[in-house]
Amino acid sequence: MQPTPPSLYRLLLGPAWASLAPAVQRLHDNPAASPSPVRHACGRFDVVPSGRWWGRLVARCMGLPKPGRSQVLLLAIESDHRGETWRRSFDGEAFVTTQAFVTTRAFVTTRASAPAHDAAALLLIERSGPVELHFRLGVEAGALVFQQVACRVCLGAWRLPVPAWCAPRIAAKASAHDGPDAGPGGADGEGGVLVEVRVHAPFLGELVRYGGVVVPQARRVPVDACVLAKEAR
């Protein structure tokens, strides 16, 4: 059995990790005692589309979640020594991204290559299809804040920078939530995490915003089958 990889978000945040709310830590951490590199969560999300038809069209072309209120979110996060794969299902529709890290000086591909405690030099990279977004992570009042700093288009081994004037912009935040949990199957006795995401595009304005409460689960949630089935289409 392979050992559970170290937490990507612990690495990225460095000492600031200790300032995160416990519920946010649970969602983004790999428990050392876990026999599996996959952790699960579920919840309910509202996805609010752009008020303009061209904004809605661009959002769908980007593979962003479809509009809808109180959508069931199922989430499986798989970790390895390169990073994490986030497999989401919004009411049965797949939205999959991969996450890793990059230094501010050069690209690296394994966590062992990263500086031991230089969290300020590390950025989160999240990729969906050919689009790769770079985020600087921070902690504000116990919440995890994602600040986008770059966008690239990946063509084979090439990563081509997208100028800021035409790049999509994403702002996201994850904070502790102590209210009633909407996730199917209950919360396994743990607090939830309020996730808020907004996606903007130059000249088009807001493309979509989505958010809701996601609850870490001690047991597996049935996200893999529906996500993998859609990936295979």
Image (cartoon, grey):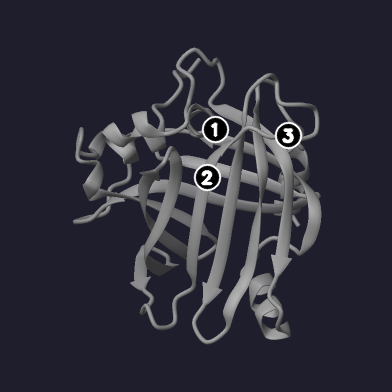
Q: Nearer the viewer, residue 229 or 212?
A: 212
The quarter of the displayed image where residue 54 is located: bottom right
- Judge depth for marks 2 and 1 and give the one in front: 2
Instruction: Look at label 3 and name its amino acid.
Output: Asp
Considering only vertical position in the picture, is 33 above or below 163? Answer: above
N-terminal-most mark, 2 or 1: 1
Is residue 232 rendered to the left or right of residue 216? right
The quarter of the displayed image where residue 213 is located: top right
Residue 30 percent across, percent down from the top left: 48, 26
Residue at mark 2 to residue at mark 3: CA–CA distance: 15 Å
Residue identifier under label 1: 27
Is residue 215 rendered to the left or right of residue 155? right
Residue 232, can we see it? no
Q: Total label count?
A: 3
The quarter of the displayed image where residue 134 is located: bottom left
- Judge depth for marks 3 and 1 and give the one in front: 3
Is residue 14 rendered to the left or right of residue 24? left
N-terminal-most mark, 2 or 3: 2
Residue at mark 3 to residue at mark 1: CA–CA distance: 15 Å
Give the farthest residue toward the top.
33
Instruction: Look at label 1 and name its amino acid.
Output: Leu
Work out which quarter of the rendered image holds the C terminus and state it. bottom right
Residue identifier under label 3: 181
N-terminal-most mark, 3 or 1: 1
Residue identifier under label 2: 174
Picture residue at 49% right of the left edge, 73% below the top: 168
Residue 190, can we see it? yes
Q: Nearer the viewer, residue 23 or 101?
A: 23
